[in-house]
Amino acid sequence: MAANAKVTGNVEYRAGDGPLILIPQGPIEVELAPDSAVISWGDAGNIQTTAIPLAEYQRYLSEGVIQSD
C-alpha cells in the first residue's frame, strides 16, 4: 500500500448497518471517485478498505483529522 495521506484524529466509517468503526491513526491510501473516497489502511498482511461519501472525506480534511501528503 502506497500511503498518500495520514489519519491524525478520529475518522469513523460505518460497515453496513453496524456501529461506527474508528480508522486507526497512521498512514492511509486515498483514491477519490466522483462521489466517494476509498480509504485503505493496514500492513501487507492485513489491508482494510472502506468507502466514505466525498463530502464526509472533505469534512475530515477541513477538520485536519486527515492530512494529505
Image (cartoon, rainbow, N blue to C red):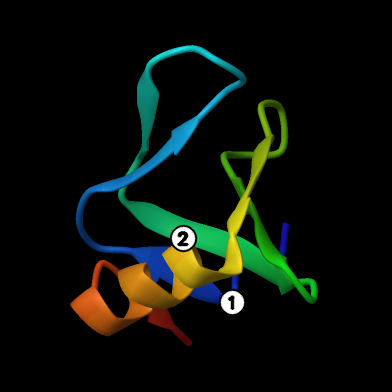
Q: Residue at x 68, y 35 (%)?
A: 47
Identify the residue under disc 1.
Answer: 4
User: Is 65 in front, or is 6?
Assistant: 65
Which label is found at residue 29? none
In what element is the residue under mark 2? strand
User: Is 27 in front, or is 33?
Assistant: 33
Locate residue 15, reporting x and y percent. 57, 23
Locate residue 50, reporting x and y percent. 65, 41
Q: Is residue 59 left or right of residue 46?
A: left
Residue 54 found in image quarter: bottom right
Between discs 1 and 2, the one toward the N terminus: 1
The number of discs equals 2
Q: Is residue 27 left or right of residue 62?
A: right
Q: Is residue 31 above or below residue 1?
A: below
Q: Is residue 3 left or right of residue 57?
A: right
Q: Is residue 65 left or right of residue 47?
A: left
User: Is 4 in front, or is 38?
Assistant: 38
Locate residue 41, reporting x and y percent. 57, 46
Q: Is residue 54 above or below residue 23?
A: below
* Farthest top residue in view: 18
Which label is found at residue 27? 2
Q: Which amino acid does the dot numbered 2 rest on?
A: Pro
